[in-house]
Every structure is written in C-alpha cells, then in structure tokens.
Amino acid sequence: MGVSEPRFHGALIGQPERSRDYVGLIAAASVLLGAGAPVADRSGEHAFPPPTYPASIEEASLRGWMRRETDMRPAQVVAVTADELVATMHPRPIARGYEVSVRGEALRPNALAVASWSYTAQLDCGRRAARLGATTGYRERNLLYVGAEIRPADESWSPIEPSTSLEAVWRSVCDPAFAPPFADPPPGP
C-alpha cells in the first residue's frame, strides 16, 4: 500500500475487501435484488431514490456522511475499505468464543448491488476462525425495508484471512489492543 492511503488513528484502511463473506455478494445481490430496479416500500406505493455515497473515504467526509445517511455511530465502525464501512454490535460469549452482529454500508455506487447488509459472526478467538451466518442485503441504507439473502451461512469454521474486514471484526472482539478506525487519537504529550 502506498503512502497516500488514508489512516485513521493508526488503523490502515482502504484495502479492497478479500474475505470470503464479500466475494459472492455482487453477483448474488444482482440476481436476488434485481440490480438497477427501484425497490418499493412495504406498501408498494412508491420507489425510493438511490442511496447516496460519501465524497471520499477520508475521515471527515465519512463522519459527515454517516451522520446524514446512516444510523451507525463512529465508535461501532471496525473497518473501512474503498467499498464498505463495517460495524459490529452486541458481542456475546458463546462456547467457542463470541457471537457478534455485523453490518455494512456500501461506500460506492453498485459496489455490492446493495446499500447495506448484515450477518451474525461466530468468532473463535483462540483459533482465529469464524463461522458466518447468512448475509441479508438491502437496497436501502440502515438495513431498511425488503432484504434478501445474498450469501448462505457457513456450515463449518474457517480461518480468518489477514487484511480483511472480517479480520477487523475478529480483532474488535478478540484483540484487546484493537484500535478502531474512528477511535479518538491518543492524548498528546
């Protein structure tokens, strides 16, 4: 990665997502959600305008966009890439580690053919592994309105690939030294 990559208080961001939870989303979402077609609300009375996207992935731009367009708080965000903003919520202990709710918001038009998505991740801290629940994608921000499964649940545990959003999810729960992208900078001297 070059020197020009954005840095958020020590967390390097901006790498393209490479984890297995991302790979099939574009094709699956296009088929299941009808790429390019307007999505009607629950009553079917009108279509919603397309979602808006941040002007850049610089911190100030993302913070302003998040405030206007999402219900995520900066403290919930664990990863920022060129394509997505990923947050975790509600970690709880399970027999093999933790289970956490994960949600994402697309940062580019048609990056995933969905505006937002969610899944549950079971995280094995000792073995650095994960088992993901089914991913549900939404054409609207904030997991609103009609969602469709865009990725099936994992049947088994898989190792976590380095430098992925899923690694950031794992680290946010399993690594006490994890510094989220929007963490307050450490106090100066």
Image: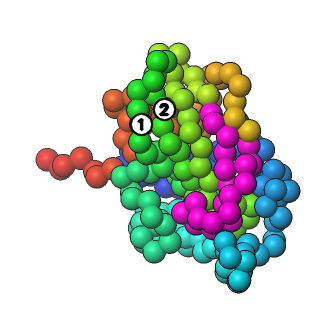
How far is disc 2 from disc 1 in space, using C-alphas? 6 Å
Image position, residue 2 (x, y; %): 57, 48
Q: Is 75 placed left or right of 51 in the picture?
A: left
- How many numbered circles does the render carry? 2
Q: What element carries label 1?
A: strand
Measured as percent of width and height from the top left, residue 91 is found at: 41, 36
Mark 2: amino acid: Glu
Q: Earlier in the sequence, mark 2 or mark 1?
A: 1
The local crowd at label 1, few if under 14, some if 14 to 19, many if 20 or more residues have their Cα within 10 Å, is some
For image coordinates 81% across by 56% down, the residue present is: 32
Circle 2 residue: 99
Q: Is residue 29 above or below residue 15?
A: below
Question: Where is 163 relative to 35, above or below?
Answer: above
Q: In this view, does 131 lie above or below 117?
A: above
| Residue under label 1 | 91
- Secondary structure of the residue carrying numbered label 2: strand
Task: Residue at 41%, 27% (x, y): give it.
Answer: 93
> Can residue 84 be seen in this snapshot?
no
Of the pair 168 and 89, the residue shown nearer to us: 89
* Residue 30 point in image, percent of width and height: 82, 58
Question: Would you identify the image quadrant in which residue 116 lies?
Answer: bottom right
Write the start and end of the magenta stretch as one range: 132-151
Question: Alpha-carbon neighbours of circle 2 within 10 Å: few (<14), some, or many (≥20)?
Answer: many
Kindly identify the amino acid type of the residue bearing the numbered disc 1.
Pro
**Percent position of residue 107, x then y:** 60, 62
Question: In the image, is 65 to the left or to the right of 19?
Answer: left
State left or right for residue 23 relative to residue 55.
right
